[in-house]
Image (cartoon, rainbow, N blue to C red):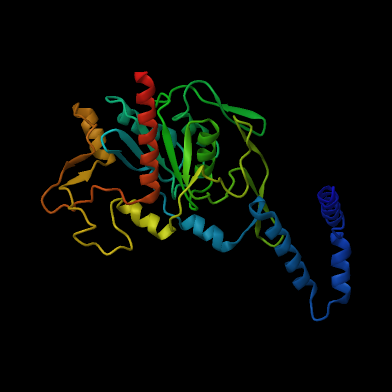
């Protein structure tokens, strides 16, 4: 009984605390009248800073530095890497989800799956971004099986067409703090549509549905004006997409791993902990396309190394990539076991 009374008292205290939030105009007026050595401009700046800070990514002040960085950003390819891991698992890494990205991604996925049936796919959205807000659902369509609602955007349903080459293939999606804007929406839609699980760290929290409103000062206020609702009823979060499985890796290390997933980072290599490098290299996108056109088997994840070409380790050191591969291997074993029963 005492616990019940205490719980009710705490709840009442909390509600009373919320109800006691002072009126903004009243506080502003008191501060303006009583604070010394504080100009109107200083008080207004503090009020604006506090308001925007409280709203987080729902409202952002676009500065000249922000505009300059956006203008100077070098565009990247839609697909920055494509390969086959351990003969049975496809790997596709995306860069910029710009206009027409769905066509490029669709071609790569068809190239991966047209001649052989793989046991799973790893979609790497780490450091991926894009501002093609309308086209991101066409990209998602490359992964969605059948006719389904991908998302509802401001009352309009974006549907899949069933043109995906994956046919329900188990998929793991890698994300991190630099997964931004349209890439975040893609990750969230794939998870909500039960297309794949997300691994890594929470995404940047940069919503797609923004409206830029010019201010009298010449600055721009970027306001989140719409809502994206997914098939499972979830809504696109303002502060980033939280992965299903968290993998803690620094951004610097992840950049190094993207360049070489087999690289030992922060460990002194010795004969006891460093396996001999196989005289092979991973298949890149060009190699996959060539094999497909020539009718060669793309189901081999390595090709002979040319004289003077750099070799790689045959053990994946990238923690997020290794975790995703282990997950897909486990799912493949379960599926094989069920099929034998």
State the residue lying farthest toward the bottom: 37
Q: Position of residue 48 (x, y in %)?
A: 73, 63
Q: Is residue 123 above or below residue 21?
A: above
State the residue lying farthest toward the top: 341
**From the image, which quarter does the C terminus lie in?**
top left
Q: Please state if 3 lies on the left or on the right of 64 as rendered.
A: right
Would residue 294 be visible to someone looking at this image?
yes
Q: Residue at x 23, y 32 (%)?
A: 298
Of 155 and 196, nearer the camera is 196
Would residue 135 be visible to someone looking at this image?
no
Q: Position of residue 291 (x, y in %)?
A: 21, 32
Of 224 and 218, nearer the camera is 224
**Quadrant assignment, res 323:** top left
Q: Residue at x 79, y 77 (%)?
A: 38
Q: Please state if 210 lies on the left or on the right of 292 as rendered.
A: right
Count of numbered circles in the view: 0
Q: Residue at x 16, y 52 (%)?
A: 309
Q: Position of residue 171 (x, y in %)?
A: 42, 34
Q: Is residue 245 above or below residue 147?
A: below
Q: Please state if 106 lies on the left or on the right of 182 as rendered.
A: left
State the residue lying farthest toward the front: 1
**Quadrant assignment, res 229:** top right
Q: Residue at x 55, y 63 (%)?
A: 65
Q: Position of residue 315 (x, y in %)?
A: 27, 48
């Amino acid at each position: 009984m005492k616990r019940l009374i205490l719980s009710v008292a705490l709840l009442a205290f909390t509600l009373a605390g919320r109800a006691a939030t002072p009126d903004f105009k009243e506080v502003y007026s008191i501060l303006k009248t009583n604070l010394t050595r504080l100009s109107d401009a200083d008080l207004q700046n503090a009020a604006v800073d506090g308001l925007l800070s409280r709203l987080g990514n729902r409202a952002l002040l676009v500065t000249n530095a922000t505009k300059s960085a956006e203008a100077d950003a070098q565009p990247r390819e839609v697909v920055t890497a494509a390969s086959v891991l351990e003969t049975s698992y496809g790997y596709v890494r995306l860069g910029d989800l710009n206009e027409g990205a769905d066509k490029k991604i669709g071609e790569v996925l068809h190239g991966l799956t047209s001649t052989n049936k793989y046991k799973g796919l790893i979609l790497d959205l780490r450091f991926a971004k894009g501002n093609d807000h309308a086209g991101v659902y066409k990209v998602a369509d490359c992964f969605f099986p059948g006719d389904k609602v991908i998302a509802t955007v401001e009352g309009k349903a974006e549907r899949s067409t069933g043109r995906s080459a994956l046919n329900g293939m188990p998929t793991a999606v890698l994300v991190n703090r630099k997964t931004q804007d349209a890439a975040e929406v893609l990750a969230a839609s794939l998870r909500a549509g039960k297309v794949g699980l997300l691994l890594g760290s929470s995404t940047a929290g940069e919503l797609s549905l923004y409206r830029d409103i010019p201010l009298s000062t010449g600055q721009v206020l970027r306001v989140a004006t719409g809502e994206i609702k997914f098939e499972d009823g979830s809504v696109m979060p303002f502060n980033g997409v939280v992965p299903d499985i968290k993998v803690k890796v620094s951004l610097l290390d992840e950049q190094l791993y993207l360049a070489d997933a087999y690289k030992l980072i922060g460990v002194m290599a010795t004969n006891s902990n460093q396996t001999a490098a196989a005289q092979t290299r991973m298949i890149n996108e060009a190699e996959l396309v060539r094999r497909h056109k020539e009718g060669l088997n793309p189901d081999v994840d390595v090709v002979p190394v040319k004289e003077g070409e750099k070799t790689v380790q045959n053990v994946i050191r990238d923690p997020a990539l290794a975790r995703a591969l282990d997950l897909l291997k486990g799912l493949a074993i379960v599926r094989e076991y069920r099929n034998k029963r």
